[in-house]
Structure formats: structure tokens, C-alpha cells
Amino acid sequence: MKNFWYACEFSSAVTDQPKQIVMLNQRFVLYRNSQGQIVALKDRCPHRGAALSLGWVENSCIRCPYHGWKFQADGQCIEIPSNAPEKPIPKRASVDSYPVKEKYGFVWLFYGNLSETERPSLPTFPKYMVETMRPVYDEGIDNANYARLMEANLDFTHVIAVHRKSFGQRIPINKTINYKVDKYDWGAVAKVNYKSLGKSKSFLNFLLGGRPELKTKLTLYLPNVTLAEISIGRGNRFDIKFGILVAHLPIDDNNTLVKRVLYRNILPIPWLDGFFRKLDHKLAQEDTVVVATLDSQLMPKISEELHVAADALDITFRQFLQKHLTASSSNFGRNIAFSPESD
């Protein structure tokens, strides 16, 4: 999907040293200029195709590691060391540059062709989560399609099977799951609440003063971000809350760079960050192990698979994919294959 802001890197990972990211079957290079602003360019010198990310930053410009060509923030070459200063720079001596913004600890890259006034706004995440809860960051490469991984994160009922050995056995699903999906230009959101969680004599019951309720809210932010908000308790200030924010960078059809932020209000002590990071990583890998085995990593047509009421949010996601990818297929790179066919 072309005309969206892609969450592509953690802000803290970008310095004045060039950093390569791989997304959409292409290489990009990020670096900070002398004012601390992030510059994003195509990571390919037009001279011989070397990766600019192997070069170095000089006076807010980047030097190619092969022949030292110097490119400024807009991608224009301003110096070729093997040419005399008075010799004109060839018109084709430039690389594509991309708008970038920083918000919520992420770098957002706009890959489309809309003017600044036409571009969508960056998403807005819940204020209570980003301002009051303790974040823990993690990342890794999953050998699965980005859209398939996102679909798992937008699924309310997979937890009883995929996560049955970790926490899924405590989720009381014994009825038809129906819920409303609210659609927006930027994505969709849905909620499912369960009246009770776990056994009557569990530690959570003692801690929270009775059988706790489980409240879940799943949000899709196009094109590549999902958020799970989880609340365990009885609707008071002692409720245990988690927010699982995930940016999925599609490397190619079968590989995704996943950047995760786990927010928590329980035990917000820095020295416990490692424990919660490992816990979040373990649960995420339970998803990946299953998703990586799906027969088709490319998203199939909606009509090609069976669906039930609980799949409403996933179906909405597929509808968004079909709508936006079909609309942009005529002018979006032919080599970008990870897309559903039009139904």
C-alpha cells in the first residue's frame, strides 16, 4: 500500500551513522543531520549501485562508500571527487528521498506520491498508554508474510489454541463471538469482553478482589501497525493493563521485520524490563510458529477461505488490503507481490 506512513524504525536507533532498513523489497538509508533531523534516501548510489548505508555522513550529507559521491538530504548529488569542481553534476546523479516524521518513539516514512497537504495524518495512539505506562522495546525477523502476521494480531480467538500452553487455557470462550467493527480511513477497531477469567481460586482473583474480567481491544492502523489493549480486573484503578504495539515491516513476501513495544502498568520497574521483554517475545513467537506454516503466505481472496463471526476484524483488514492494493496496482512497483488478488 503506497500512500501511507510506514512505521519503519525506532527513533532511538537512528543516529548520525547511516542505518539501512529493508522494506517493500527495497533498501532505504536513514541518518540524522547536524540539526538532529532524520533524512531518508533510497539506499542505492546511481553511479554503480553501492549501498549508501555503508558510507558516512559529512556536513549533513551522505558520502557513497564506493567513489565518495556526496548526496544532500533531498537526494541530489553535489560533489563527485573524480570530477573537477567546475564540471557540472549530471542531472541523473540523484537518489530518491522520502518524507519522514517522528512520533511515539518511531520513525515514520512516507513511500507514496501525494503532496504534503494530501498525505494522511500520523495515527494517534491511546494517551493513557503512551504517557503513563512503562514501555519495553524488542525486534526481530519473522519468516512469515507481514499481512498474515498482522491478521494474527487482529484475531480475538486464536489465543485458546496458539497460546494454550502459556495463557490461552484461561480464556473462557464457549459461545459465539460477535462484535462490532468500527471502520475509519486509517483502519479499524473492535472490542471483545469476557465476564470472567480463570479459575475461582486463582491468584488473580485474590489480587483483584474477585473473578476478574478480561477486556480486549484490537486496533488496525494502516498500513503496518496493530495494537492490542488488554485489561484484567474489575474496572477499577487496580486493573492490570497491557498494550502491545507492533510495527510490521514487509521485507518481502515471506519475511517481516517486526518491531514491538510492550506497555504495562504492572511492576513498572526498569530492572524487570528484561523479564517482560522475554515474555512478550515468547508469546509473539507462538504466533509466528503457526503463521509461518500457512499454505499461502500471500493473502488469499476472502472467498477462498472459510470464515465465522469471530473473524470480522480480520475480514475488514483483508477488505482494506484489496481496496488499497487494487487502487494503486497500476502505478506501484510490479515487483511488490505481497498483495491479495481482487475478489
Image: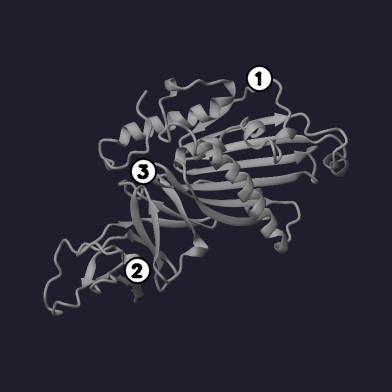
Q: Helix, strand or loop at disc 2? A: helix
Identify the residue position indicated by label 2 in the image: 54
Residue 267 lies in what quarter of the image? bottom right
Mark 3 neighbour class, 10 Å CA radius: few under 14, some 14 to 19, many 20 or more: some
Judging depth in this view, the residue of 281 and 113 nearest the camera is: 281
CA gap between label 2 and label 3 equals: 28 Å
Percent across and percent down for residue 121 are 45, 46
Identify the residue position indicated by label 1 in the image: 176
Q: Answer yes or no: do the residues labelled 2 and 1 have beta carbons within 8 Å?
A: no
Side of 21 where 64 appears, left or right: left
Can residue 125 be seen? no
CA gap between label 3 and label 1 equals: 37 Å
Judging depth in this view, the residue of 62 and 160 nearest the camera is: 160
Residue at 71%, 39% in the rendered image: 167
Residue at 40%, 34% in the rendered image: 298
Identify the residue position indicated by label 3 in the image: 3
Q: Is 5 situated above or below 31?
A: above
Tag nearer the camera, 3 or 1: 1
Residue 189 lies in what quarter of the image? top right
Q: Which of marks 1 and 3 precedes in the sequence?
A: 3
